[in-house]
Amino acid sequence: MKKLLFILGFGFFIPLLVISNTSLDADPPQVYIEVPDEVPADTPFNLTLSASEPVTYTIKYAGLELTEVAQNYTLSLLAAEGLQTLEVSAMDGSKNQSSYSYEVYGIATLKASMSLSESVVAGSPTSIKVAWPADGLQPSSVAVYVNGVLEPLYQKGNEAIALAGIPLGSPSQTVPVQAVLADSYGRTVTLNKQLTVVADEREVENLNLTETTYSVVTAEAQEREREALDGAYQSARTRPLPLWREPFVIPIEGRMTSGYGTPRRYISGGNVSFHTGADIAAPQGTPIRASNDGVVLISNFYPIKGGLTVIDHGASVFSFYFHQSKFLVQVGDTVKRGQIIGEVGTTGLSTGPHLHWEMQINGVPTNPLDWVDKLLP
């Protein structure tokens, strides 16, 4: 009887254990999940899973499905753009399953476009615009390169404007234009276009200046003027934004005596150099007007350039006025478009009263007539 009771007791004991284990196995596995709710699109993010027991994970995200047997599991997923659903299921050895669903928002990459002229003549200015939606992700930085050269630019609303001067003497060629935008997540977008440069080929103009007239051109004089300009450019770096709000104007009315970009030889047998401005003849004392708003960087006499005024218009744009007989502004003055800044003369390397007028971008001469009546070239 005791044996029977023992057997019965044993017989009753086993089912109780089985029932108890079955009850435990019916519980789905618990999973701790770490996943970001927002992540930059096209960049990897980590999904971390930790279950209460070894399980078979099934993960679905943006068209991707994968499985993995593990208890603790971390994987890297490439973020898809827009609102995506991340599904995670975990199945234990008893086929008990738990499922989880999360929404992960993939922040879109920058959407940008670049516009520029199809072609430009050597020695001319040009502008490149890079734009992006005002209501979209904004860039943290923008850079524009023309033929590999980083060009100055400024931002205006949801666009960046780069100004470039195509050097005088450039041959006919196609040069690359590249814009590189970065966002606050470290992602970059690169835009590429081509710009056709058309050579400006002209015959050399022989001026045949007398030795007395040309005697002002010395190494010392050239160095002095170069140092003055270098110092002016350094101070101009504090004004990266344009100071002008209206189109540029021509400084004086008169007869064009020597055009911009002409290759010239000053004395017989001398070197050939390009004329980097436009010469406009006018009577001595004719008022000279600022071509646009700006700040006076230089107002002084020099051996070659004569009475020289340089105006910084911001955004690396400068206007130059040579051979003046009189100054009516001083360094540091703020001038307005059309304001009288000096008077025509024949100082420096000059054979008669005239104004040599230059427009430069970041130290590169450009055709000044291409600026007249325009906000941007």
Image: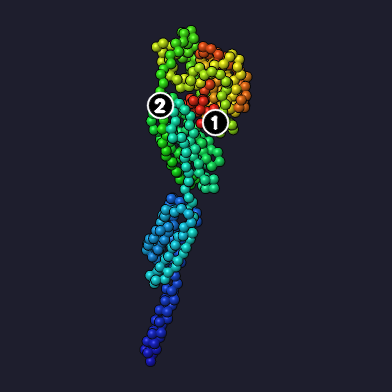
| Rendered location of residue 70, percent (x, y) | 38, 63
Q: Amino acid at mark 1?
A: Lys
Q: Position of residue 49 (x, y in %)?
A: 44, 60
Residue 129, percent across and down?
Answer: 49, 38
Q: How is the image coloured?
A: rainbow
Q: CA distance from mark 1 to mark 2?
A: 23 Å
Q: Residues within 10 Å of mark 2 (few under 14, many from 20)?
A: some
Mark linked to residue 374:
1
Q: Compared to 155, does 370 lie above or below?
A: above
First in residue order: circle 1 vs circle 2: 2
- Answer left or right for 146 relative to 303: left
Mark 1 is surrounded, within 10 Å at the Cα level, by few (under 14), some (14 to 19) or many (20 or more) other residues, namely few
Q: Residue at x 47, y 38 (%)?
A: 115
| Left or right position of 347 against 203 | right
Counting from the top left corner in percent of width and height, residue 37 is at 50, 56
- When asked about the image quadrant of residue 255, the answer is top right
Q: Nearer the viewer, residue 236 or 365?
A: 365
Residue in view at x 39 percent, y 71 percent: 95
Q: Nearer the viewer, residue 191 or 18?
A: 191
Q: Secondary structure at mark 1?
A: loop
Going 51% across and 31% down the picture, which residue do you hit? 377
Q: Secondary structure at mark 2?
A: loop
> Which of the numbered marks, if any, corresponds to residue 199?
2
Residue 124, placed above or below residue 23: above
Relative placement, left or right, of 29 versus 336 is left
